[in-house]
Image: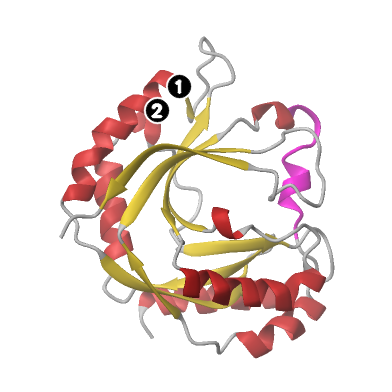
Amino acid sequence: MPRRDRAYAATWERFSRLSRTQDSLADERRGWRRWLLTPVVAFVIPVDDPAVCAGLESWQRALAPWLVYDPQPAEHLHITLHIAGRLSPVSWLLLPSFLRRSEVGRLAERARPVFGRFNPFEVGIGPPNAFANALFAEVQDEAGCLQALRAELRRALPLRARPPLRWPFVPHVTLGFWGRQPVAPLVQALVPYRSAAPLPLRVTAVHLTLYHQDSALLRPDVLRTAREEIVAGYRLEP
């Protein structure tokens, strides 16, 4: 079994052994932590192919009864390539992994040459899988193009925009969040979809985005009311 397939199999195995899910959206808004929920600065690959979006939405509809929060809307579906940090709440406060707005513009230009060196490539989206906190679709990348693109991008960015890696890179498309509930019924609901065929997606573009969420109120529509600000767009050139 290829290493990437093993990573997804291990993720599913870990989830299946849990007793309860984790409500990360609620956890990160508790106490003083909500003041650090400034916009996320991230390079993402948009998932905007109509056929792929339709397939992902069909999985979201099927599993919606088990999602405490409304599913990720189609216009926000993406593969996260690299998280550079968060936007600093004030210009004079530079905490680790926080970036000034002026730095984001410089990141955009520093990254631009990287994408011109890569040709468009194809990945497969699916089947559904699960983290402790979220429902997601796997990203099948047999040629390792995502890993290569991510490595080149990270090398091109300054150290401040390369926060320490907290977990291995497992490419995915977040479909929704579980909230806090027992895991066993979720495993039972997901099993029929674990053999779904991946949906072909041609990767031709990357966006540098600021992802804004309400940092205080946590409502079921928290993902639908989030705002994605595109700072820069890049094309992969053949």
Residue 236, horizontal then vertical, whole percent? 24, 55
Q: Which residue is mark 1?
A: 101
Residue 156's place in the image compared with 183, above or below, is above
Across and down, in percent, residue 83 comes to 45, 43
Q: Position of residue 11 (x, y in %)?
A: 57, 72
In magenta, the rendered stretch is 22-32
Relative side of 62 to 49, left or right: right
Residue 214: say if magenta: no
Question: Residue 60, how many percent across, how many down?
Answer: 67, 71
Q: Residue at x 65, y 29 (%)?
A: 36
At mark 1, the secondary structure is helix
- The residue closer to the viewer here, 8 or 71, is 71
Question: Around disc 2, counting alpha carbons within 10 Å, would you say few (fewer than 14), some (14 to 19), or many (20 or more)?
Answer: many
Q: Amino acid at mark 1?
A: Arg
On the rendered image, what quadrant is the N terminus found in?
A: bottom left
- Relative horizontal placement of residue 103, taking residue 66 as reference (left or right): left
Find the residue positioned furthest to the front.
50
Residue at the image point whose x is 29% and y is 46% from the top: 234
Query: Mark 2 highlights which residue?
Result: 104
Q: Is residue 24 magenta?
A: yes
Q: Is the residue 175 above or below the residue 5 in the image?
A: above
Q: Secondary structure at mark 2?
A: helix
Tell me whether the residue at label 1 lies in contact with that at label 2, contact meaning CB atoms closer than 8 angstroms: yes
The answer to whether one can see residue 218 in this image is yes
Q: Which of the image's four quarters has the C terminus? A: bottom left
Q: Say which of 57 and 23 sits in front.
A: 57
Mark 2 residue type: Val
Q: Is residue 17 visible?
A: no
